[in-house]
Each structure stands twice: as structure tokens, then as C-alpha cells.
Image (cartoon, rainbow, N blue to C red):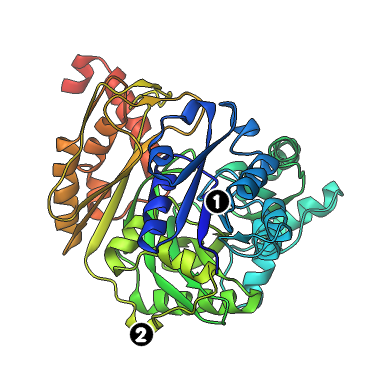
Amino acid sequence: MFTSVLIANRGEIAVRIVQACRALGLRTVAVHSQADGDAMHVCMADQALCIGPAAAARSYLDPTALLFAAEVSGAGAIHPGYGFLSENAGFAQRVEEAGLRFIGPSASCIRTMGDKVAAKRAMRAAGVPCVPGPDERLPDDPAAVSAIAQDIGYPVIVKAAGGGGGRGMRVVEDAASLHAALAQTREEARRAFGNAEVYLEKFLGHPRHIEIQVLADAHGQALWLGSRDCSLQRRHQKVMEEAPAPQVDAAELARIGARCVAACRQIGYCGVGTFEFLVQDGAFYFIEMNTRLQVEHPVTEMTTGIDIVQQQIRVARGERLAITQAEVRTEGHAIECRINAEDATRFTPSPGLITRWRLPAGDGVRVDTHAFEGYRVPPHYDSLIAKLIVHGATRDEAIARMRRALDEMVVEGIATNLPLHRRLMREAGVVAGAADIHHLERWLRGTAVHAAAPQEALQT
């Protein structure tokens, strides 16, 4: 039963963890790089320690520095947030070996679910449907690989076994392209993840990205907390999320949710996690499990009324879940827009000084952020500066509230993607709730062509 938590992260998620710890009466220790000395989470925490220079590799990604900070501060647990070391099994193991509590699943669970091939194998064993393809790494023999691809049926997708974040994958349309794609993906995987092993799956042409949030304790209890639709993506990076996922059969969703819960019990999972699926023509296909808190967790909090971060900390302290599956209710609809410090058309980062900062307010509006007027967005980290979340009784009401909130939000001094979100909230496919994972990139290509066309052509 730890009483203090070291937050091994930065930005809005570090602020969110400080708030959750305060609500539970826990002491907080913030770590920060030299670039984040005046960051909001540093000012909010009970204690703050500088752990290195601006480069993440020498600060937030340095396990030795983090563990030393925990030792000198007397922290009993480490919360990794998301990104950085949150899904690093080696770091989780070192935390455990140091006699501290890692606020997340065990190192063995992270290791199993972090290996995409092992994860598929475990999910099939638990009855969770997976994308067609063998639960094994590809052999070195080119003829054997060709036979596997032929058996799956083209198009296929090559994926890195240890991949994530949209990296380490390539679509292969025909046999002639297979071996070049394999070589490229293996090299990318080796460089990015230190693991050159890859596998093959069937490529789905128009799926939606649907998630199921789970919460499990150390006493064999597990819950699923409804669904999220995260289909609006650019280069495999999510731009907007909503809960619950629209136009999904409730009975099928409940069946899949129950399978996810069974899988948690089977692998001895403890903590929060997210099962990610591709859904096409009503069928669910498991692709991976995120063994950490997700960026988009607020939409689930808004629709269920459950503070997921507090629950994550509670189960890490050994507490039993205080709610049952029957008590989990999804009410209304929530939408989240990720507000990034980036150009809305070229998607290039836009670090710098925020000279004006006005946040929207009103019924059903929430903003998770670490930024403020006078804050200098550093160039060293992810460009996320805020998450704008709204909740309404219906999806139409949530869309209307998001439109109004986006119009009210003002950020000056740096470029942001607010203009993109304002356009998306009025785009027909988004409003209809029918967008697949390729929708945003198709729409962006179309608007780029439209903007570049001669005025005469537009008139004809």
C-alpha cells in the first residue's frame, strides 16, 4: 500500500496523474528534463526532481535516472503514463526488482502482449477473434513465406512482431511485391524496435478501428467499460476519438467485451488496458492490446462516470474493484479532439511561445492540458498540447458541443490543428459516424487536390 507516486512522464498526462493522486490522498513526485523545469506538472507535484537534459533518451527514457529519483524521493510506486517507458517490460521488471510498484500490469504481461505474435496466440486461446493469418513469425525461407501469403490471400500486410505506433508495417498487393516489402519491414523493425521478426496478416480494405477498455484487479475480477471508435487517423496516428463506437451491434459488442474480460483473467492481467480491433462488415478482428493508459481514456470516463486513472492506481495498491460488470453503464456520447502544436495543413511541428490561450467552457466540456498563456512549447517532445473532450446526451448533441467548443478555443503564438478539427466536425462522413481508418487520409488528399485546382475547373 504505497503512499507516494513518482510520475515518469510529462505533459497533460502527468497533470492528470497528479490530480488523480491528490484525490486519493497520495503524495506525488514529478520528474522533469531541463526543458520542462517550469512545466505545469512540476509546479503541481509535492516534490520535483530534474533527471536530465531535454533529450528524452537522457531523461524520460532513462530507467536508471527514474529509479534513482524514486529512491531519493522515497516514492513507493512509479506511474509511467503513456508513451515513453509505459509498455517497456524491462523497465517494469526493474521497478519490481527495486521493490517498487509499477502502476500497470506485470512485466510478463507487458512482454506477452507487446509481442504481436504472442499476443495473437494468447487471444485466440481466449476465444478473441483475430485477423486471418498464422500466429507465428515468418520463416527465412522465401518459398515458405510465399506459400503463407498465398494461403492468406492478397492483399496482405507485413507487420513487425515488436512494432507499435503505426511503424513497422507494409501493405503488399501481390506476390511480386512481397519479398521487397519483407526486407524493408524487417530492416525498419530492427532499427526501430531492436527486433527484426515480422509476421503476415490479411489486409482489410475498409475497417473501422474499435477499442474496448478493460480494467482488472489482482483478485481475478475484470470489467470492460464500453467501446471507442478511433478510426480518424493519419499515418496510423489517432486524431479524434469517440465513445461509444457508433453503428456497432450491441449484442456482438457485448460478446467481444466478455471475451476480452476472459482473456484478462487467463493471462493474469492487472491494471487498465485496451483491446484494439479492426471491424469490417460487422466482424471484429483483434490486432493488439495496449497495456497502459490510453490517450483517449477521457471519452470512456465521460460516458461511464468511472475515473479510470484513479481505478488504475487503486488496483495497483491491491484494492479490489468496487464495481461489477452489471453496474457499468454507458450514458450519452463523448468526443475527444487531440489539439496539437502543428501546422493544420502540412502537419509540421510548431513549437514556440503561446501568447494567447483561451479555453472553452460550459456544460459537458472538459479540457485536459498542461499548457497555458506564456507557456513555451518545447521542440523535443510530442506535439500534443491539449485534449478537448465534450459529452452530450446524444451523438448529435456531442457534435454540436464540440463545434462550439472548437470555435471558442483560442491559441495564438504557435500554429495548431484547431482549423482541421473545425472542418472535420462538419465533414459528412464524420458526422454520419461511418468513417473507416482510411477516411481521413482520403479526405485530406481530396481537399489538397481541390485547393490546388484552378478556379475555372472548380466552377465547371
Label 1, on which residue? Answer: 80
Q: Earlier in the sequence, mark 1 or mark 2?
A: 1
User: Residue 368: percent from the left, percent from the top?
Assistant: 32, 46
Tell me if residue 146 comes above or below residue 216 in the rendering: above
Residue at the image position 44 percent from the left and 46 percent from the top = 14
Residue placed farthest to the right in the image?
141
**Left or right for 406, reference 340:** left
Q: CB under 8 Å between callouts 1 and 2?
A: no
User: Residue 398: percent from the left, percent from the top?
Assistant: 19, 55
Residue at the image position 26 percent from the left and 58 percent from the top = 334
Q: Is residue 169 visible?
A: no
Residue 403 vs residue 18, the one in the foreground = 18
Residue 215 vs residue 48, the one in the foreground = 48
User: Residue 213: percent from the left, percent from the top?
Assistant: 44, 65
User: Residue 290: percent from the left, percent from the top?
Assistant: 55, 58
Tell me if residue 328 comes above or below residue 117 in the rendering: below
Identify the secondary structure beneath mark 2.
Answer: helix
**Left or right for 258, reference 151:** left
Tell me if residue 11 comes above or below residue 352 in the rendering: below
Q: Quadrant of residue 451?
A: top left
Label 2, on which residue? Answer: 326
Which quadrant is the C terminus positioned in?
top left
Tell me if residue 189 comes above or below residue 92 in the rendering: above
